[in-house]
Image (spheres, grey):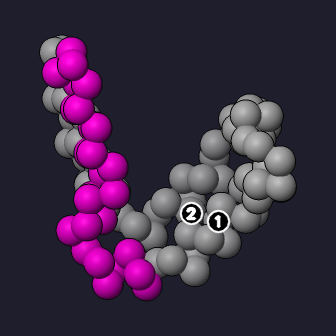
Amino acid sequence: MKVKIRTKGVHLSMPVPVSMVGFVIRFIPDRIFEDMKSRTPGPYCSLISKDIISLVLRESLDLFKEHKGLEIIHLEAPDCTFVSLKL
């Protein structure tokens, strides 16, 4: 997976092994997940937890490897900020 972030002052390109994504999720604070739950409507808020997201990622690892190079996120803002996430 490759993360690219460009702003006027920062140009960051960072490769992240797909297998490390689950490891990184364990270190995200619980308050972040609680904040996401509070902004998620109705029945879907029960799906936002570290355990559920880790399970989804583990089950999706084969698909990530199969579709290597697929751009998941591509954002460009009017102030020339650019964010890209590729598998």
Where residue 3 appears, x then y in whole percent? Answer: 29, 47
Seen in the picture, residue 81 relative to 31 is either above or below; the reply is above
Q: Is residue 52 magenta?
A: no
Name the residue: 25% across, 25% down: 77
Q: As shown in the figure, which amino acid type bears the numbered disc 1?
A: Ser
The disc placed on residue 22 is 2
Q: In the figure, 48 relative to 1: above or below?
A: above
**Residue at (54, 53) in percent of width and height:** 24
Nearest the viewer among 30 and 41 is 41
Image quadrant occupied by the C terminus: bottom left
Labels 2 and 1 touching (C-beta < 8 A):
yes
Q: Where, quadrant-wise, is the N terminus in this rendering?
A: bottom left
What's drawn in magenta, residue-wise? 62-87
> Which label number is shown at residue 12?
none
Label 2 and label 1: CA atoms lie apart by 6 Å
Sequence-wise, the earlier of marks 2 and 1 is 2
As for residue 85 lying within the magenta part, the answer is yes
Location of residue 75 in the rendering, given as x and y in whole percent from the top left corner: 28, 38
| Circle on res. 54 | 1
User: Is label 1 in a helix, a strand or a loop?
Assistant: helix
Which residue is at a point 33% across and 49% down the rendered structure image? 73
Q: Residue 48's x, y, as percent?
A: 74, 53
